[in-house]
Amino acid sequence: MTTERRHDIDWLRVIAIGLLLIYHIAIIFQPWAMFVGFIRSDNLMEYIWKPMTMLNVWRIPLLFFVSGMGLFFAIRKRNWEQILLERTIRIMLPFIFGILAIAPLHIFIYQRYYNLPYGYYPHQGHLWFLGNIFVYVLLLLPFYFFVKKSETDKVKSALSSLMSHPGGPMLISLFFILEVLLVKPQLFTLYAQTWHGFFYGFLAFFFGFLLVYSGNKFWQTTLKWRWLYISLAIILYSIRLVQFETEAPGYLMAIESNFWIFSLLGFGYKHLNKPSKTLSYLSQAAYPVYIIHMFVLYAGAMYILPLEMPIMLKFISIVAFTGLVCYLIYEFIIRRMKFLRPLFGLK
C-alpha cells in the first residue's frame, strides 16, 4: 500500500481543531455555558448556536476518522512495538501531563472570575479525546497488523469494490445508526466522557483506517460524488433545523454526520492534497494548540467580557486573543524548549 503523505488529511485535522476553538468560544455566549463549566457572558448570542449545531454533528467524528487514517499510514513503516511506544509517548504522555498540569488551569481561571475558593482539580477536561484514541489503538492494534500482513486478501478486494460505488460509504452509516439505537444517548453531540462518545469514536476510528486500507477507490468515489454527499447533508441539516429545532433523532444525525464527513473528504482530496510550508507549520502546531487552547480562551474571556464593547466585538476579540496567545505560547515556549516538546505531543 502507498506510503505517500496525504496532505489533505493533515489539512482536515488542522481545520477541525481550528473550528474546535471557535466552537468552544461560542459556548461562552450561550445561556447554559456554566452548566458545562465555562465562563458565561452576561450578554448572550444564542443565534450563533444554530450554525454551531451544524458543525457539532461532524467535527469530533471527523477527528476520529482522521486519527484512524493517520494510524494506517503510521503502521506502514513500523512494527507493533514501535507503534505502541510512539503512541504512548505522543498520546499518553501529553494526556497524563494535561490532566495534571493543563486542564486544571482553566478551572483556576474560572474560580478567579467567579470569586470562588481556589482548588486544584486534576481532570481530563477537553483532553478526553486523547484517552479515547489511546484505548482505540490498544484495542485495534492486533487487528490492524493482521490486516497489514494480509493486505492482498479477498476482504480488501471486496471492500475496494464496495467503496467504488456512491452507496458504499453510505453503508458505513448503518453501524453508526446501530450504535445510537443501542446506546440511546441523551444528546447525540454529547461525546465527551460518555459511552456514546466512546463507541461512536471507536467506529469512526476503525472505519477511518478501513477506508484508507480499501485503496484509491474510496477517494475516487468521494471525489466524484462529493456534491451529492454535501447536498444530502444540507438537506438533513435543514430538516433538523426546521422540524426538530437542531436536535433530530439520533439515527438521522448519524447519517447527516457521515454525509458531511464524506463530502469534506472528497473536497479535501480535490483541493487540499498538496504540500505547503503553512500546512507543515500548522500541522505540527495543531496538537499543542489543542492541548492549551482551553485555559487561553478562559483567560481571554476573563479579560475581554468585562469590557464595554458590542457583543460581537467581544466574540471576535476572544477568538483573536485565543489564536494569538496560542501561537505565542507554541512558537516561543513549547516549540523551542526541548524538554517541553514531548509533553505536548511533539517529537
Image (cartoon, rainbow, N blue to C red):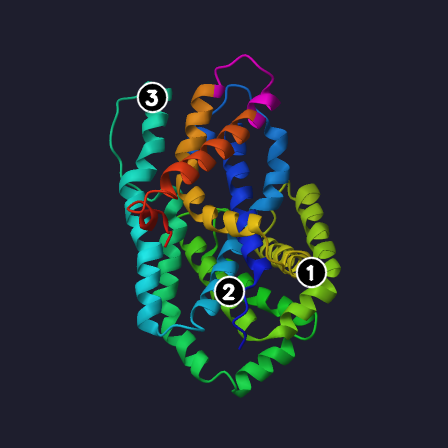
In the figure, is residue 90 to the left or right of 315? left
Q: Which amino acid does label 3 sit on?
A: Arg
For the point 33% across and 18% down, the residue is 115
- Closer to the N terminus: mark 2 or mark 1? 2
- According to the picture, the residue beneath numbered tag 1 turns out to be 270
Disc 3, SS: helix
Compute the Cα span from label 2 to label 3. 41 Å
How busy is the neighbourhood of tag 2: few (under 14 within 10 Å), some, or many (20 plus)? Answer: many
Depth check: 230 or 74 in front?
Answer: 74
Compute the Cα span from label 1 to label 3. 47 Å
Q: Are marks 2 and 3 in contact (CB under 8 Å)?
A: no
- According to the picture, the residue beneath numbered tag 2 turns out to be 69
| Residue 308 magenta | yes
Q: Are marks 2 and 1 in contact (CB under 8 Å)?
A: no
For the point 59% across and 83% down, the residue is 158
How busy is the neighbourhood of tag 3: few (under 14 within 10 Å), some, or many (20 plus)? Answer: few
The segment highlighted magenta reads 304-316
Q: What residue type is labelled 1?
A: Lys
Asked if residue 19 can be seen in this view, the reply is yes
Q: x%, y% of residue 119?
A: 24, 29
Task: Please state which of the two labelled residues, at mark 1 or mark 3, is closer to the viewer.
Answer: 1
- According to the picture, the residue beneath numbered tag 3 turns out to be 112
Q: x%, y% of residue 234?
A: 71, 50
Compute the Cα span from label 2 to label 1. 17 Å
Q: x%, y% of residue 347?
A: 36, 55
- Closer to the N terminus: mark 2 or mark 3? 2
